[in-house]
């Protein structure tokens, strides 16, 4: 169980987040939705203490992350940023960096086995000796996901991981994240703009507006009225093969 309580954050006197609270369960895949400036990226960077909120806390299985060391946080929460600097490292070395919170004096056989397993799970084993800055956008995202997963987190935070991908790679990434959440017992929060990708793959939907939680719940809470109020666009929701799809009118 992950409990977010009264998270607030301000830049100078500009209040970005206002008493954000919600609960999520193990293995849930949560879409964080809203217009630019609603506070989506700020929220997830507050949840892993990249930014320090002015109030609030995050409890993971009863433990308050704001009382944890940086190393303990990295063992509980992993984060994939919207933009990742492409360094001149091999795929394998890049993924191995994710084991840093666990490495003592040197890498162990267990560290190497976990890296091998995660590279296999994301389908990047054959790329292990290639340099990350020579990969395609979709391949880089898989490497970043593998690096986050080797941290063996309880909570995975993703900031727009599909924004620079073509439709095929967008769906591959979302399917992969959903699969990993189930198999690795990880809760996922993903900042995403594509409502239909969220509807297809996510379990719950957290709508932010003006720094507040406007709506939170399962697919039934995604309505034409909510989409109009949050995005200020007219949409029509239809069902095709049992899936809800948003059509912009």
Image (cartoon, grey):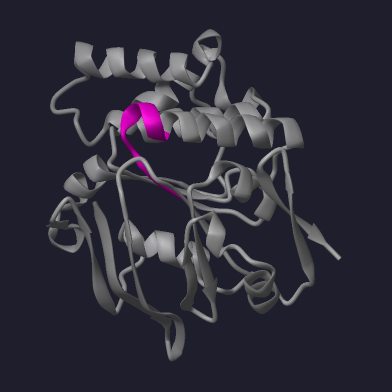
Query: Residue sitting at 31 percent across and 34 percent down?
Result: 185
Tell me if residue 184 is in the magenta stretch: yes
Q: In terms of image quadrants, where is residue 26?
A: top left
The magenta segment is 181-189
210 or 98: nearer the viewer: 210
Query: Residue sitting at 23 percent across and 68 percent down?
Result: 57
The image shows residue 191 at horizontal and vertical percentages of 53, 55
Query: Residue sitting at 48 percent across and 48 percent down?
Result: 203
**Please, is residue 188 above or below residue 238 in the view?**
above
Tell me if residue 218 is in the magenta stretch: no
Q: In terms of image quadrants, where is residue 182?
A: top left
> Disc count in the image?
0
Q: Say left or right for 105 vs 90.
A: left
188 or 235: nearer the viewer: 235
The image shows residue 208 at horizontal and vertical percentages of 52, 71
**Please, is residue 76 above or below residue 224 in the view?**
above
Q: Say left or right for 63 vs 116.
A: left
The image shows residue 140 at horizontal and vertical percentages of 58, 30
**Please, is residue 154 above or below residue 218 in the view?**
above
88 or 2: nearer the viewer: 2
Q: In terms of image quadrants, where is residue 34?
A: bottom right
The image shows residue 37 at horizontal and vertical percentages of 59, 74
Residue positioned most to the right:
249
Quarter in which the C terminus is drawn: bottom right
Does the rendering let one see residue 99?
A: yes
Query: Residue sitting at 30 percent across and 18 percent down?
Result: 114
Residue positioned most to the bottom:
13
Does the rendering let one see residue 144?
A: no
């Amino acid at each position: 169980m992950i409990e977010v309580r009264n998270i607030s954050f301000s830049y100078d006197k500009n209040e970005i987040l206002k008493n954000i609270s919600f609960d999520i369960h193990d293995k849930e895949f949560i879409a964080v939705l809203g217009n630019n400036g609603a506070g989506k990226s700020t929220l997830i960077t507050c949840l892993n203490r990249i930014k320090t909120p002015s109030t609030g806390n995050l409890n993971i299985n009863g433990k308050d992350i704001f009382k944890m060391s940086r190393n303990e946080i990295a063992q509980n929460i992993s984060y994939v940023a919207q933009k990742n600097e492409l360094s001149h490292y091999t795929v394998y070395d890049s993924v191995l960096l994710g084991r840093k919170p666990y490495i003592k004096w040197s890498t162990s056989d267990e560290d190497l086995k976990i890296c091998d397993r995660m590279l296999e799970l994301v389908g990047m084993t054959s790329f292990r000796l290639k340099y990350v800055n020579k990969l395609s956008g979709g391949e880089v995202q898989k490497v970043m996901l593998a690096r986050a997963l080797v941290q063996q987190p309880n909570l995975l935070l993703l900031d727009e991981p599909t924004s620079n991908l073509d439709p095929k790679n967008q769906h591959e990434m979302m399917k992969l994240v959903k699969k990993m959440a189930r198999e690795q017992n990880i809760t996922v929060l993903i900042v995403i703009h594509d409502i239909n990708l969220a509807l297809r793959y996510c379990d719950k939907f957290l709508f932010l507006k003006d720094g507040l939680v406007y709506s939170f719940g399962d697919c039934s809470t995604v309505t034409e009225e909510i989409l109009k109020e949050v995005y200020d666009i007219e949409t029509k929701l239809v069902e095709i093969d049992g899936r809800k799809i948003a059509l912009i009118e």
